[in-house]
DNA sequence: CAAATTAATCAGGGGACCTTATGATATTTT
DNA sequence: AAAATATCATAAGGTCCCCTGATTAATTTG
């Protein structure tokens, strides 16, 4: 029997965390424009490419659940920022291969490699607890996604956890 | 001396959490359109009003760090959705008082009152740990905000923590 | 009372994200 | 070679968030 009050407390703190973090991000990154989320749009593409470079636009679109047109739009924006390059495949000249530039690779990893300041206030024990808890939560969310839409997990779980595993060690 | 590896692990899990949660939200709320964040735009206004109802537009704007025009836009959108009402002040006929409708109040609290499913996978002990950790993190973030921009904290810390404290018990 | 200040509005814009529709080109199938 | 299919580009549209500038209406102030 789970303690409802404890859940409520945690839920509240979690919401508060989301809010405060959002505000803090806003303040900190108001000069840079890298405060965009990694879960959508251009960020998504960078993430997918940093896991598997040299994907075709079509591949990107299906992996990220975007239409080909959205993908094209974001890719073009990234090209303008010199984060990726487009290049026609020699094998099948219909397809365009997208590759990360060095800058793009940096940008993609910078996003995740930076340890937020607020984690430094935690003790080693708390960090372990936090990691354990988040691992459980993430698993639960993966399950939720799987039951709602099994095909997504194949696309995403891989991309995400591989990406994160990479810079873990 | 903090353990850097532990911090890295936690940071990774946190990022993963953000991603997976975003995807899960997308899947779950694709039918409803309430998957908007509470930290900006219309959501912000609802939040502020649920803490202090009957604010003037000007008050809202300053509290939420928005221009009067943005505020007007969001308020009008909320009026269209029947979440708030506009009413001219009798005291000073320049000002417009914004009030939550019942629906608006529901919507605002529904946002926070719902306990995410993924918390049910945690034990009571873990929930306590989680709450403790998030409390520390939030405090740290408030500090960060305070040093960057002292005036904000007065506006926000209040609004947020009061709002959350309300439904805690 | 005239002047200055304040609250809200209108008009217009920009950026990000995402969609459908249409057409062009290249490849595969028949 | 002709037809069907796949990949990509272009155009257009919509939503959301947020801003600047100019204007109107009400209140305060000198």
Image (cartoon, coloured by chain):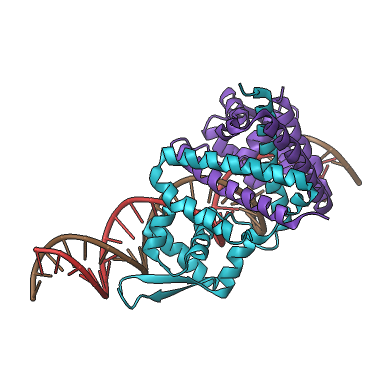
Chain colours: A cyan, B purple, C red, D brown
Residue B39 visible in the picture: no
Residue found at the very far bottom of the displayed protein:
A90
Q: Position of residue B47 (x, y in %)?
A: 66, 34
Tell me if B40 is positioned left or right of A75 in this view: right
Q: Residue drawn 38% across and 56% down?
A: A62
Q: Residue drawn 34% across and 70% down?
A: A95
Tell me if C2 is positioned left or right of A7 in this view: right
Quadrant for the C terminus of chain B in the image: top right
Residue A28 visible in the picture: yes
Which sits in the foreground, A85 or B135? B135
Q: Position of residue C6 (x, y in %)?
A: 77, 42
Residue B129 location, quadrant: top right
When the figure is inspected, residue B86 is found, relative to residue A49, above or below; the finding is above
Tell me if B24 is positioned left or right of B59 in this view: left
Q: Position of residue A52 (x, y in %)?
A: 47, 65
Residue A4 location, quadrant: top right
Q: Residue drawn 61% across and 21% down?
A: A1
Which sits in the foreground, A125 or B108? A125
Q: Position of residue A141 (x, y in %)?
A: 53, 40
When the figure is inspected, residue B137 is found, relative to residue C27, above or below; the finding is above
Q: Residue drawn 79% across and 42% down?
A: B139
Which sits in the foreground, B34 or C26? C26
Quadrant for the N terminus of chain B in the image: bottom right
Which sits in the foreground, A139 or B82? A139
When the figure is inspected, residue B158 is found, relative to residue A104, above or below; the finding is above
């Amino acid at each position: 029997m789970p303690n409802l009050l404890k859940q409520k407390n945690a839920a509240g703190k979690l919401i508060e965390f989301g809010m405060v973090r959002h505000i803090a991000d806003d303040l900190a990154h108001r000069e840079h424009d890298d405060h965009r989320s990694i879960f959508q749009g251009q960020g998504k593409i960078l993430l997918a490419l940093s896991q598997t470079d040299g994907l075709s636009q079509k591949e990107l679109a299906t992996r990220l659940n975007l239409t080909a047109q959205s993908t094209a739009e974001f890719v073009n924006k990234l090209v303008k920022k010199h984060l990726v390059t487009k290049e026609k495949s020699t094998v099948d000249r219909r397809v365009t291969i997208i590759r990360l530039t060095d800058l793009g690779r940096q940008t993609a990893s910078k996003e995740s490699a930076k340890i937020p300041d607020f984690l430094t206030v935690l003790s080693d024990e708390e960090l372990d607890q936090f990691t354990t808890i988040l691992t459980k939560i993430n698993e639960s969310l993966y399950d939720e996604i799987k039951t709602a839409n099994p095909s997504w997990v194949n696309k995403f779980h891989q991309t995400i956890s591989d990406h994160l595993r990479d810079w873990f060690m």
